[in-house]
Amino acid sequence: MARFALDQLDTLRTVVDEGTFEAAARRLHVTQSAVSQRIKQLERAAGQVLLRRTTPVTTTEAGDVLLRHARQVDLLTSDALARLGAGRPDGGDDGDDPVPTTLPIAVNADSTATWFLDALAAVPPTVPVVFDLRRADQQHTAELLRSGDVLAAVTATREPVQGCSSEPLGVMRYRAVASPGFVERWLGARPSAGGTAEPRGLDHGRLDRAPMVVFDRADDLQHDFARRLTGHEPLAPRHHVPASADFARAVVLGLGWGMLPEAQAGPELDAGRLVELAAGDPVDVPLFWQRWTLASPLLEAVTDAVRATARHALHP
């Protein structure tokens, strides 16, 4: 039976995280030749090619299996050393302070912008961890979990990925909003006082041609909302703004209408800089926390912080 050397597994994980053999060599403080040799030895032991030599490198199906194994070994080793009160072998100094374990997590941009960083900040400072956040739409995180690229994810998928557990976090509520000037120009309406009520005279039939702001080409929230109100596919031009804060700013500035998380939209609605297009018709997106089913104190501590923060930040 093949046995995989720890330095080879660590090298595989580092190459994938850094994206190139050269960057991995710098991170590991070895030569690029040594990195290549370790990967070749690991591929020889596995009997299969593990990495596609692209830029950045990507894993093959066999590589996914060993990447997942490498992350599990790294996490369990870190937990064991923490319980022993020791630093990791590569920790430097005298090993009194544990070197933090890198925990890759997939999370959508809206959660990062509204509540998820609060959850990470709530992890006790005694837990030796640093976070590697991978931005991914809540609908597209299963593959990152399956491949071993991340150990946990905020996702809209209830069904757990094989080897993972899934628990509900709550509902992120979105509001369809636009600037007062935008609704007057494009939708033939005059905003109501205070901004939170639906504008007077708003013609939803014109929504399918009014410019919209979308996050990226996988963002269907605006499209689905317009189709539900108008009964047909929207023909509207789209602004692509792939950053949550910039997305909200684009809507406030009147570039288009868009679906904003309630936490982002609320202050702008109260200030009258935004108005709702359908005050009684929010869009709710259920969110779930999926994580590997490892008995890891570190992963448990992060899960506890995420669970507690979501309980206060999201709708039940």
Image (tube, grey):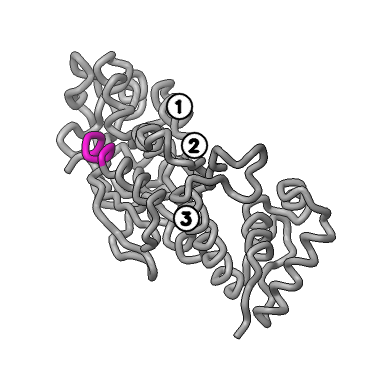
In the picture of the structure, the residue carrying the numbered disc 2 is 239
Percent of width and height locating residue 242: 51, 38
**Is 311 in the magenta?**
yes
Among the two numbered marks 2 and 3 on one chain, the one whose residue lies closer to the N terminus: 3
Q: Which mark is nearer the camera, 1 or 3? A: 3
Q: Nearer the viewer, residue 111 or 216?
A: 111
Give the amino acid type for the residue marked by disc 1 in the picture: Ala
Q: Which residue does the image show at 42% across and 61% down from the upper left?
A: 142
Q: Which residue does the image show at 63% across and 73% down from the upper left?
A: 4
Alpha carbon of mark 1 to alpha carbon of mark 3: how far? 48 Å
Give the amino acid type for the residue marked by disc 3 in the picture: Ala
Q: Is residue 44 above or below residue 88?
A: below
Q: Which residue does the image show at 15% across and 35% down from the upper left?
A: 280
In the picture of the structure, the residue carrying the numbered disc 1 is 250
Among the two numbered marks 1 and 2 on one chain, the one whose residue lies closer to the N terminus: 2
Q: Nearer the viewer, residue 250 or 265?
A: 265
The span picked out in magenta is 308-314
